[in-house]
Image: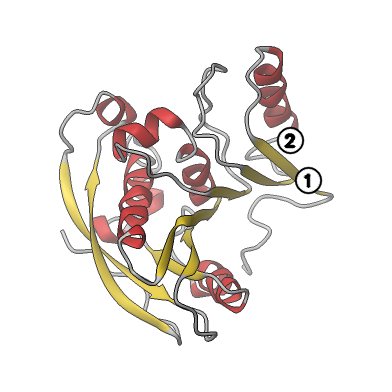
Amino acid sequence: AVGHCQAPQAGTTAITFQSSTYSDFRQLLTREAATGTVTIRANLGFPEEKKDRYPAVIVVHTIGGYRDTNEGYAAAELRKSGFATLTYDSFAARGTTGVAMSGSPGYLPPGVADAYAALRLLASQPRIDADRIAILGFSYGAEVAHLTAFEPVRSALNPGPGRFAAHVAFYPGGNFGVIAERGAYTGSPVLMLLGEKDDNLPVAKFENYLAYARAAGNPAPIETVIYPGAYHAWTVPD
């Protein structure tokens, strides 16, 4: 399957990379063969300032798919701050939508598969600093950003030492966590940006998760910022 992505923004180039589709996390974590492969169309952008190599951020979309006014805006601002950026649409690449996939156990595994495929792509680029590639996501993408910090997911999708340098999650769903044990996370820092009034992930739920990990003696490498009065998806214009 060949998925369509957004039209290239100014200062970006359309590229493709290969990824995989999994029906559920069991298939992924037990390292069974993927259900299928897919070609992802993406946009790679660089800052105007010329450097030999750049740090990079992979920006992952919401359940609504890529939007110029949300993910595109964030990527443009990151480029102004000196980061190369990569954006794409995991749902469009598979000829579907987030709404259509959200009721199935297979709606999140393609997101994490695409993220690690994107990491491998960027790490191979001579203009990218392979040790300074982060992932940032919104809602669905925030859940992907958190899941990619789990060591079992990383080792299943990216055998070897390669990992994300940082994970930034804007209002994630909080559907998945890991058992609080040594090695549950890759060790890279995770930043959670949460809305005080977010019904999708109540702040208390995530605070309980962090307390559980601390009490078990293996605190998660997660920092949280709580925005007073903010609801879910506060960055999305509509």
* Residue in front for this viewpoint, 103 or 229: 229
Query: Which element is circle 2 on?
Result: helix
Task: Report the side of 176 relative to 201 (left or right).
Answer: left
Q: Is residue 12 left or right of residue 190?
A: left
Q: Which residue is mark 2?
A: 203
| Badge 1 or badge 2: first in the primary sequence | 2
Quadrant of the image for the N terminus?
A: bottom left
Residue 9, by quadrant, is bottom left
Q: CA distance from mark 1 to mark 2?
A: 8 Å
Residue nearer the viewer, 10 or 23: 10
Q: Seen in the image, is 109 located left or right of residue 2? A: right
Q: Residue at x 83, y 51 (%)?
A: 229
Amino acid at the residue labelled 1:
Ile
Q: Quadrant of the C terminus?
A: bottom right
Toward the viewer: 83 or 39? Answer: 83
User: Within 10 Å of the Cα at label 2, are there few (<14), some (14-19), or many (20+) other Cα atoms?
Assistant: some
Callouts 1 and 2 close, C-beta under 8 Å:
yes
For label 1, the SS is: strand
The image shows residue 194 at horizontal and vertical percentages of 71, 45
Picture quarter containing residue 138?
Answer: bottom right
Q: Against 196, is 220 above or below?
A: above
Please indicate whether residue 167 sits to the left or right of residue 38 in the image. right
Note whether 131 is above or below 74 in the view shown: above
Residue in view at x 48 percent, y 71 percent: 84
* Amino acid type shown at disc 2: Val
Residue identified by numbered label 1: 226
Name which residue lies at 52% across and 32% down.
175
How far across and down, in percent of the image, does residue 187 sit?
55, 35
